[in-house]
Image (cartoon, rainbow, N blue to C red):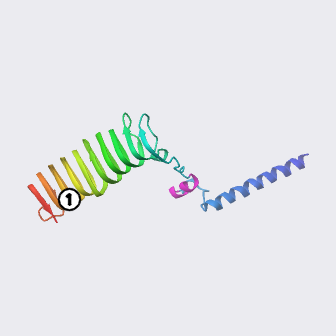
């Protein structure tokens, strides 16, 4: 009986070792030392869940969504009252208090803030407007307008961009690079020969 038990135990140990070796070979990583586990290794071990929720024609933010991966893309209307929901892509109208999205195409009307993490094609109206990339013809109207790369118009108390192709109208206008016109009390184009001019400044 003891010999039979020993044989079964040895077989189990052998099977476990073979399984572990196969798993390491599949991942093509060496995880003997926990300190050697890199971010790429972790991505291989724990894959993010696939986004398969689809596209919705309307969304009402009556509760908080943990992440953009768990939210549907919107083609139509999104109402961000009372919550600011997280979405990867919204096309259409965004109305509420605080709108956050990675890519947006259409019209954003959020009272407190319109926040586009990546690409904006359309316009934003609110107190605080931000877009990383708004080079597909955009318009920002608010107290504070901020964009990385922008083509179009900014109208507000303070307008700031890294690269602007268009017009800035406000009390303070600032751009690292400007191909267009600034109209305001303080106009700054840092890459221009005339970095600061009152009333109006032109970049070309």
Residue at horizontal 73 percent and vertical 58 percent from the top: 18
Point out residue 204 in the picture as x, y percentages from the top left corner.
16, 66
Residue at horizontal 24 percent and vertical 49 percent from the top: 140
Residue at horizontal 42 percent and vertical 40 percent from the top: 59
**Dot 1 corresponds to which residue?**
166
Point out residue 103 in the picture as x, y percentages from the top left corner.
38, 52
Other residues around mark 1 within 10 Å, as few (<14) / some (14–19) / many (≥20): some
Seen as rendered, the residue at the extreme right is: 1
Q: Between 41 and 116, which is closer to the camera in this rendering?
A: 116
**Horizontal placement of 47 versus 3: left or right?**
left
Q: Main secondary structure of the magenta part?
A: helix
**Horizontal placement of 4 versus 57: left or right?**
right
Magenta stretch bounds: 38-46
Point out residue 170 in the picture as x, y percentages from the top left corner.
15, 49
Q: Between 193 and 201, which is closer to the camera in this rendering?
A: 201
Point out residue 47 in the picture as x, y percentages from the top left corner.
55, 52
**Horizontal placement of 80 versus 18: left or right?**
left
């Amino acid at each position: 009986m003891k010999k039979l038990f020993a044989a079964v135990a040895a077989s189990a140990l052998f099977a476990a070792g073979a399984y572990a070796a196969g798993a390491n070979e599949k991942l093509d990583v060496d995880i003997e030392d926990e300190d050697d586990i890199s971010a790429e290794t972790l991505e291989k071990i724990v894959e993010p869940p696939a986004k398969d929720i689809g596209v919705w024609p309307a969304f009402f933010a009556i509760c908080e969504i943990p992440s953009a991966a768990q939210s549907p893309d919107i083609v139509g209307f999104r109402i961000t009252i009372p919550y600011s929901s997280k979405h990867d892509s919204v096309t259409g109208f965004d109305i509420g208090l605080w709108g956050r999205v990675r890519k947006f195409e259409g019209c954003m009307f959020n009272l407190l803030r319109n926040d586009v993490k990546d690409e904006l094609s359309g316009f934003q109206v609110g107190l605080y407007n931000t877009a990383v990339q708004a080079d597909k013809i955009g318009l920002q109207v608010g107290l504070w307008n901020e964009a990385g790369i922008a083509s179009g118009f900014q109208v507000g108390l303070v307008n700031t961009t890294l690269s602007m192709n268009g017009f800035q109208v406000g009390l303070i206008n600032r751009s690292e690079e400007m191909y267009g016109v600034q109209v305001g009390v303080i106009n700054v184009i840092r890459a221009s020969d005339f970095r600061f001019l009152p009333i109006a400044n032109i970049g070309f």
